[in-house]
Amino acid sequence: MTTAPPSLAAPGRLRTYASFVRFEHTLFSLPLILAGVFSVVAQPLTAARWGLIAVAAVGARTAAMSLNRIIDRQLDAMNPRTRTRELPAGTMALAEAIGLLVVSTIAYLAACTALGSWYLKVAVVPLAVFTLYPYLKRFTPLCHLGVGAALALAPLAGFAAAHPDLQQPLPAFLLAGFALCWVTGFDIIYATLDEAFDREHGVHSMVVWLGRRNALRVSWALHVGAMALLGVLTWSTTSSRFATGAVWVIAAWLGFAGTVLLLWLEQRWAEDVNLAFFKTNVAVGFVVLATVLATRMATGGFFAWPAF
């Protein structure tokens, strides 16, 4: 039986490409990038620099998802949950996926070059992480840290792109630590969907290694760590500002409390991955971004808007 060639109608292909790179999952990385941008006060960014940051972010994320889908296409074809993805289902040709990877990587590297020579020098770091982490599940149950590391780069990239002098990086590193713990924790929850398949096919995960109950305990511990790091960030930027920015200090702590609540709910609803992962989890990044914006207002405002 032969697979029919994919349709080349433009609207259909755009929908296929958006599905291939899980465009909606940008809701995880975008708030983290912006949180890194706003993590400390600096000079206004030009509209051109905002545009370059956007191109770099979209290019890097598209390259990451393309690599993941290309590398995992054979595993995806065997897994009942993932065999309907574009490559194993035949709705996208491998050549198309490689082409998308090449174009997105070129766009990312071009934006890094325009941002400055230093950015081009470090551009290989995200690409190396994106290439390595799909392979981790083949030999270590710590593979979830690869996904966490990929998302942890988002606030660091936002900070570096918006602050060329790289001064006061501590808030961005705290955000990166938060993202590492948060994303690693929810990836463990996500892995419960494939426990039976992974055991049968020798795919490594924390769930296979420790069992579902103990793996979810590790996930909870990671989310407690994420809460602690966000608490340190909130405290360090608001502890001496109550007298001059009480409203924003209160808003920042409310954002922190909201994040804690969402992570708690995510753990409580871990058996319903659709609710915990795809709904509750999406809100976390935006609440963290709101928390960071409130801390910036408490410390004298932020430079968010483009300077034309």
Image (cartoon, rainbow, N blue to C red):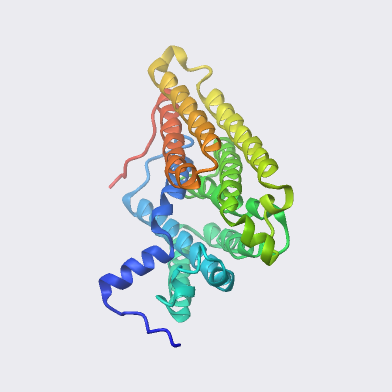
| Image-based side of 151 in relation to 50, left or right | right
Q: What residue sits 44% from the left and 59% below the top?
A: 56
Q: Looking at this view, is 15 or 226 the one in front?
A: 15
Q: Give the quadrant of the N terminus.
A: bottom left
Q: What is the number of callouts on the image?
A: 0
Residue 239: x, y in percent? 53, 18
Which quadrant of the figure has residue 303? top left
Which quadrant of the figure has residue 173? top right
Residue 111 position (above or below residue 299) = below
Q: Looking at this view, is 58 or 115 the one in front?
A: 58
| Image-based side of 62 in relation to 218, left or right | left
Q: What residue sits 69% from the left and 53% below the top?
A: 208
Q: What residue sits 61% from the left and 51% below the top?
A: 149
| Image-based side of 184 in relation to 140, left or right | left
Residue 90: x, y in percent? 43, 77
Residue 232: x, y in percent? 59, 27
Residue 182: x, y in percent? 57, 41
Q: What residue sits 50% from the left and 46% below the top?
A: 273
Q: Looking at this view, is 66 or 267 the one in front?
A: 267
Residue 203 visible within the image: no
Q: Residue furthest top?
A: 243
Residue 104 position (above or below residue 156) = below
Residue 72 visible within the image: yes
Q: Looking at this view, is 265 or 175 the one in front?
A: 265
